[in-house]
Image: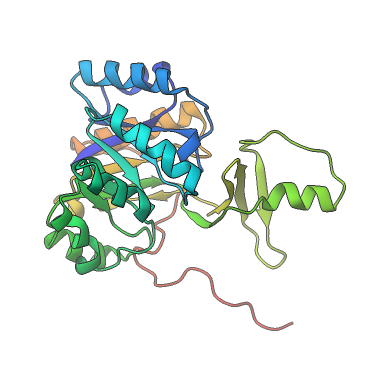
Amino acid sequence: MKILSVIESEKDFIKLKALSDGFIIRYDRLNYKSRNRLSIEKIWQLSENIQASEKEVFLDCTLLSTNNELEIFVAILKKFIKINGIIVSDIGFINIALKEKLAHLLIYNPETLLTNHHDFNFFADYKLYGAFLAKELSLEEAIEILALKKYKSFIIGFGHLNMFYSRRKILSNYLKSEKKKKYALNDFHFQLREELRPDFLPLLETIHGSAIFRAKPLSLLAELKQLQTLDYLVLDNVFINRASYYQVVSTFKAVLSGSIKELPVETDSGLLYNKSLIQKEPKQ
């Protein structure tokens, strides 16, 4: 099992180099969670430095794309031909890679769709590099899929999972309707609270639309021994401050090495042991 950390700068890479087997870089023009607008040139240089250190590097391009973004992806695909992989969620991106004979670079991550081994292995015959297990699987279901995998497997091992994503600008439309002041895109300080529930849900709006995330980050720290056949464990940094995130990566590295450590943030186990965490409230 290899640890993949999300980085946004050369500083992140230096801090996490000894703790990670590889790194994920988000490209903001093709990713709805990116909070740093790195140019292609900076991403290229960062990826070169990562590979020079004999670490793996992946570009995250998970987005519901438009025709214009398909054109951007073509350029990205041809430029980053030497990296380990490109994470995508759009079937259009896969079709482009197949035509360019570069499908071996792609990792498919539709977030919620790959819930059984037939779904998970579908693109193995097309020679993709791998795929992500669905984010809402039980532990038993994840283990069953891993036992039957035909290519590289990825899973979110830590991070706030998104509950909703849309190309609509929910936050800016609300502020406009309420005649509130404008705010900067990619602001990671907004939260949403439902009237009848206590949790505050992180809310993000970028140029690509809006996303609502679960209140607490998921953690698979306690399940690592049961997931030994997993190829890549992804530790996400969205809504986690840098200092805490560095500690998170360090903790996972230590536990994989046999140590006992606690995470610096409050987490939950998602749907690993429960089919549903949220029940309908009783009528008042």
128, above or below 249, in the image = below
Quadrant holding the C terminus: bottom right
Q: Quadrant of residue 16?
A: top left
152, above or below 142, in the image = above
Residue pictured at 83% horizontal, 39% vertical: 181
Query: Could one spot residue 266 in this view of the protein?
Result: no
Q: Position of residue 277 (x, y in %)?
A: 48, 68
Quadrant holding the N terminus: top left
Residue pictured at 62% horizontal, 44% vertical: 205
Q: 212 or 67, which lies in front?
A: 67
Residue pictured at 45% horizontal, 47% vertical: 63
Q: Total of numbered circles in the picture?
A: 0
| Residue 2 shown left or right of residue 71 in the figure | left
151, above or below 104, in the image = below
| Residue 110 shown left or right of residue 208 in the figure | left
Q: Position of residue 190 (x, y in %)?
A: 67, 43
74, above or below 284, in the image = above
For this orientation, the residue located farthest to the bottom is: 283
Give the image's coloring scheme.
rainbow
Q: 224 or 156, which lies in front?
A: 156
Residue pictured at 35% horizontal, 48% vertical: 93
| Residue 162 shown left or right of residue 151 in the figure | right
Q: Position of residue 5 (x, y in %)?
A: 34, 33
Q: Position of residue 136 (x, y in %)?
A: 38, 63
Q: 277 or 14, which lies in front?
A: 14
| Residue 16 shown left or right of residue 8 in the figure | left
Query: Could one spot residue 101 in this view of the protein?
Result: yes
